[in-house]
């Protein structure tokens, strides 16, 4: 598992983020405070405080570099 911090501070960023990570079969969790939600859920993402950076847990052991390259526009 790898954890990175991301910023999703606009509706368009949230939509493109979900479209990008749904290409992968891995599990992705967003952690904000005590809340953990499925990162592939647009409704779940909008329930978080998007004004702050959010931790993204990537549950993948291989091809992690490919995932990180896709996530580059969102990482802090």
Image: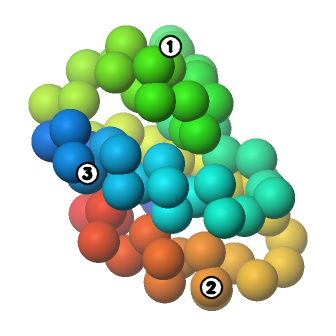
**Closest to the observer, 44 or 36:** 44
Q: Secondary structure at mark 3?
A: helix
Q: Give the number of the mark in front: 2 or 1.
A: 2
Residue 66 - label: 2
Would you say residue 9 is visible in this rendering?
no
The quadrant of the image that shows the C terminus is bottom left
| Local SS, label 1 | loop
With respect to residue 9, does 67 lie above or below?
below
Q: Which residue is the site of mark 3?
A: 13
**How many residues crowd around disc 1 within 10 Å: few (fewer than 14), some, or many (20 or more)?**
few
Q: Position of residue 75 (x, y in %)?
A: 33, 64
Q: 69 left or right of 65?
A: left
Can residue 45 be seen in the rendering of this structure?
A: yes
Q: Is residue 25 above or below residue 70?
A: above
Specify the quadrant of the image occupied by residue 66.
bottom right
Q: Residue at x 51, y 63 (%)?
A: 20
Disc 2 is placed on an element classified as helix
Give whichever of discs 2 and 1 has the lower sequence position.
1
Badge 3 or badge 2: first in the primary sequence: 3
Q: CA distance from mark 2 to mark 1?
A: 29 Å
Residue identified by numbered label 1: 34
The picture places residue 9, in percent across and down from the top left corner, at: 16, 42
């Amino acid at each position: 598992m790898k954890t990175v911090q991301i910023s999703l501070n606009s509706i368009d960023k949230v939509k493109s983020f979900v479209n990008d990570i749904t290409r992968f079969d891995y599990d992705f969790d967003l952690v904000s405070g005590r809340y953990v939600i499925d990162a592939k859920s647009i409704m779940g993402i909008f329930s978080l405080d998007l004004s702050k950076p959010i931790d993204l847990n990537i549950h993948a052991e291989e091809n992690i570099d490919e995932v990180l390259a896709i996530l580059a526009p969102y990482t802090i």
